[in-house]
Structures are given as C-alpha cells and as structure tokens.
Amino acid sequence: MNNFRIFAHGDKFDVDAFLASATLHPDSIWKRGERFYETWGIAFVLGDGQKLSLFEQERIAIEYLSANRETLKALAEYPGVTTFVLGLQYHIELDRRTFGFCMGPSALLMWHCLDIGVSPTFYVTLDTRRESEGEQDVATDEGCEPGFC
C-alpha cells in the first residue's frame, strides 16, 4: 500500500463544499457510508512511497507543501477537518544486530508542516530477513560484556 500522501478527513467535513472552491484536485474522495468509511475525506498522492527513498519523499513533500501552501492551509482550517496528515513511507531492512532506530522529519519539512498545520506521520515497514542462509546467532560469548549480548 502506498502511504506517501496527504489526507484530510472528519465526521463533519463537507468535502463537496471544500472542493467547490479549491484549486487542488484530490486523487481520492470518500464519503461517510460509502464502503466502510465513517468520515468524509480527501487524499492527494505525492508519489510511490514504496519506491522512493525517504529523502526523495521529503524533497517532493516540501516542494508540494510550498507550491500549494495557501490551499493546504485553508484545508487545515476548514470546518469539520479533524485529521490532516502528511504520510511518508519508510521501508527498512534490519539484521539481527539492530535493536532499534529512531526517525523524524528534517527541520525544513517540519517547518512547512507547522506552517500549514499538517501532521507528518511515518509509516514504517520492517524487513527482518536474515542476511544469509547460514547466518549465525549474533550473540556469542566472545567479546561480550555481561547483559549486553
């Protein structure tokens, strides 16, 4: 699933009224009661998050937020919009030695998000496949301090 997109929704968000005055054209629109939807909403696909690096997604997002600043600010403040998200997609391949990681938006992306009123969200998928068929356990007695292997 592609999560590199901007979406807005809410129980009382009048999608048709917003779109009547908006200059942006969403890639998808949903209305409460259609299929499984419980809210009204719209989404703008920014690219293929499964194929683009996180750095490339940030560059595209910054350009899109900058180019559409006023319309997106209006969307953030539109009556009935309760959720407004910029989704970025990150796939990471982990080996058995990785025990954690952290991530967040760049300062420039965060500035644009704060200016507009959109929440950056990272959708992370983990690939924990072994590096090779014959990979041995990483934790061994050699060179390990007690409690750290």
Image (tube, rainbow, N blue to C red):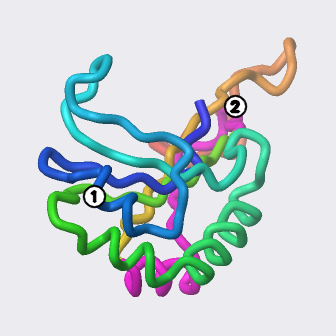
Amino acid of disc 1: Ala
State the residue at coordinates (16%, 65%).
79
Q: Give the residues drawn in magenta, as a range.
A: 93-116
The C terminus appears in which quarter of the rendering?
A: top right
Mark 1 Cα shell of 10 Å, populated few (<14), some (14-19), many (≥20) = few
Task: Name the mark on residue 41.
Answer: none
90 versus 20 height, above or below:
above
State the residue at coordinates (39%, 58%).
19
- Residue 107 location (% of width, % of height): 54, 84
Q: Mark 1 falls on what kind of element?
A: helix
- Residue 37 location (% of width, % of height): 27, 27
- Residue 146 location (% of width, % of height): 49, 43
Q: Nearer the viewer, residue 38 or 126?
A: 38
The residue at which mark 2 appears reads as 138
The residue at which mark 1 appears reads as 17
Q: Single out the residue that lies furthest toward the top.
A: 133
Looking at the image, tell me whether mark 2 or mark 1 is earlier in sequence order: 1
Amino acid of disc 2: Val
Count the labels in the image.
2
Mark 2 Cα shell of 10 Å, populated few (<14), some (14-19), many (≥20) = few
